Amino acid sequence: MRSYNPDLTPPWKRSAPVPEVPADRDLVVEEVTTGFCGAVIRCEAGTVTLEDRFGKHRVFPMDPRGFLLEGRVVTLIRPSAAPTRPTRTASGSVAVPGARARVARAGRIYVEGRHDAELVERVWGDDLRIEGVVVEYLEGVDDLPSIVAEFAPAPDARLGVLVDHLVPGSKESRIAAQVTSPDVLVVGHPYIDIWEAVKPASVGIRAWPRVPRGQDWKTGVCEALGWPPNTGAAWQHILSRVTTYKDLEPELLGRVEELIDFVTAP
């Protein structure tokens, strides 16, 4: 003789605690009032969308005790968002989460000034640490040939140099031509100063101003744009607007990548 439970209250109305289950995608549940059974395909604020085996979709409120999971009453809750990690570095390279900085190589990359070094660090810093490449600034390239000689480049200690305003006929081009070691690569961009290598739109201006010859370029830029005459503060403003390689002009991007490849080549 079959015995019956005297409590005929439907299981989803009983007062006993029920487990809370995250409504993860593809979780198969049954909605208690309609009997609709399907897999979770979407979970939004207060609702869950199920898809049955025929491809039909139904949206249900995520009420307490509102679903059956393998015959057990459950309360569906919104799944917690998994912490996201950047998949790309600021330079566009594939990010390597948890990677440790490599011991510094003997090779180096030299740039003209502090602003150049800060911009390279902002965009390529993650890549440089993984590769073990140190960037140093020179405060100008007038003494570049003697600086190179002092560094004593070799096949296992290559030197890369980034020069501002490296265009035919410029003072910088004449200095760079004096460096002939096969273990040194001197490249440059066409801009008078590294500021110009930041896209104007990223800084919120239409274009970089033209500064008359003979006037300090950075001071002239601040005057033309109506910025306070503090080039250090102006640079910090410019640098703060750079978040990825997309904020920089291609003429700089290619040259920095070229230098990194050169100093890290086997």
Image: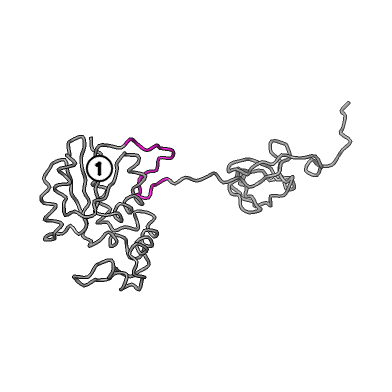
Give the residue displayed 25% in from the left and 42% down from the top.
108
Look at the picture and state if 262 lies above or below 195: above
Quarter of the image for the C terminus: give it: top left
Q: Nearer the viewer, residue 56 or 177?
A: 177
Residue 218 screen position, x and y as percent: 28, 66
Q: What residue sits right under mark 1 in the picture?
A: 108
Q: Position of residue 99 (x, y in %)?
A: 40, 37
Rendered location of residue 30, percent (x, y): 69, 43
Q: Quadrant of the N terminus?
A: top right
**Of residues 146 and 31, the one drawn nearer to the viewer in this rendering:** 146
On the image, the x and y values in percent for residue 224 come to 30, 73
Question: In the rendered structure, which amino acid carries the disc numbered 1?
Answer: Arg
- Tell me if residue 252 is in the magenta stretch: no
User: Magenta span covers which residues?
Assistant: 87-103
Q: For the residue labelled by badge 1, is the local secondary structure a helix, a strand or a loop?
A: strand
Q: Residue at x 11, y 61 (%)?
A: 169
Q: Is residue 101 magenta?
A: yes
Residue 132 vertical placement versus 251 (above, below): above
Residue at the top extreme? 1
**Front-most of residues 180 and 18:** 180
> In the figure, 200 relative to 82: above or below?
below
